[in-house]
Amino acid sequence: MSRKVNSRRAPAGSSIRSRAYVHIQQLVASGALPAGSGISELHLAKELGSSRTPIREAMNQLAAEGLLKISTGGGMVVNELTREDIVELYELREALEVYAVGKMARAFMHPADQARLQQLVDGIGTLQQELQNTKKDRLNAKQMERFLGYDLGFHALLISMARNSRLEKIINDTRLLISIFAMYREGHDLESLQEIQRFHQKILDAVAKQDPETAVNLLGQHIQASRTERLNDYDHWSRESTLKRSVPSFFDVHK
């Protein structure tokens, strides 16, 4: 009697769980769910048209990965990073991204991939030009959304070219965790944009020339500079938060 191979279907809730998993990640990355905000199983279930079970499973998975945590009231909230968390995440990101870029810089880059990466680099240049034309000091919220698309897109495409799906997931999850705190920061100024575009362009040029040593050194410097900026942002935010709790009347007067 013959048997059919792989005749079992995936559990009905698995696709909903996957959708919920990605949906929650996107809400956090976009800032729609900032650090400390609660997440409603019931609301997500209604939004995705499912029962609460696959939603709960997705939330539990994200809690295990550090994006969510159990609140004192028993529900789930978006995790709030400590300074030590940021340091550790950047150390992990540097180790893995540098390895991935070194690996791919030893291989031939397809012209189509190079063109897509160049578009992402040039996108940051467009934002610089807009800032100069409007004579504003910093990018506004909408422009920062575009910047994050260019920045995350550049790094994500680079890592995907290393063709290691497990490595890619860990790096993307690490960047998502870092983005929880990144929502506190102000828009980039012209100098920051110029520095980021300069790094991206030089990294792209090194990879295209199959120069792994230069690509690795530049990416390491780029990630270290980003870590310093995020830690400075965190320290400023932490001081401001402490002052607001200690001397709320000062901030009321200066509104």
Image (cartoon, rainbow, N blue to C red):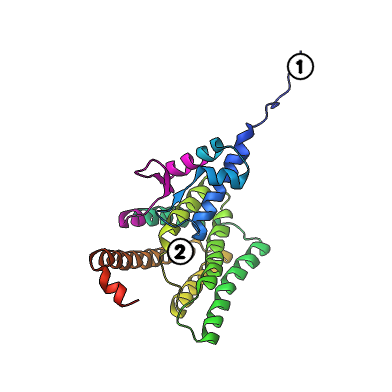
| Number of the front mark, 1 or 2 | 1
Q: Residue at x 51, y 73 (%)?
A: 197
Q: Position of residue 143 (x, y in %)?
A: 54, 73
Q: Residue at x 55, y 77 (%)?
A: 127
Q: Position of residue 207 (x, y in %)?
A: 55, 64
Q: Is 172 a magenta residue?
A: no
Of residues 193 and 108, the one nearer the viewer is 193
What residue type is disc 2 on?
Leu
Toward the right, the furthest residue is 1
Toward the top, the furthest residue is 1
Helix, strand or loop at label 2? It is helix
Residue 64 seen in render: yes
Of residues 129 and 156, the one nearer the viewer is 129
Mark carried by residue 219: 2
Res. 4 image quadrant: top right
Asked whether the residues under the numbered discs 1 and 2 touch, taking CB atoms below 8 Å apart as contact, a structural biologist would say no
Estimate the spatial distance between the alpha carbons at disc 1 and disc 2, rounded to whole Å. 55 Å
Q: Which residues are magenta?
A: 58-87
Residue 210 seen in render: no
Q: As displayed, is residue 63 above or below residue 102?
A: above
Q: Position of residue 172 (x, y in %)?
A: 50, 53
What residue type is disc 1 on?
Ser
Of residues 47 and 209, the one nearer the viewer is 47
The residue pinned by badge 1 equals 2
Q: Is 62 a magenta residue?
A: yes
Of residues 181 and 164, the one nearer the viewer is 181
Q: Residues within 10 Å of mark 2 (few under 14, many from 20)?
A: many
In the picture, the quarter occupied by the C terminus is bottom left
Q: Residue at x 26, y 67 (%)?
A: 243
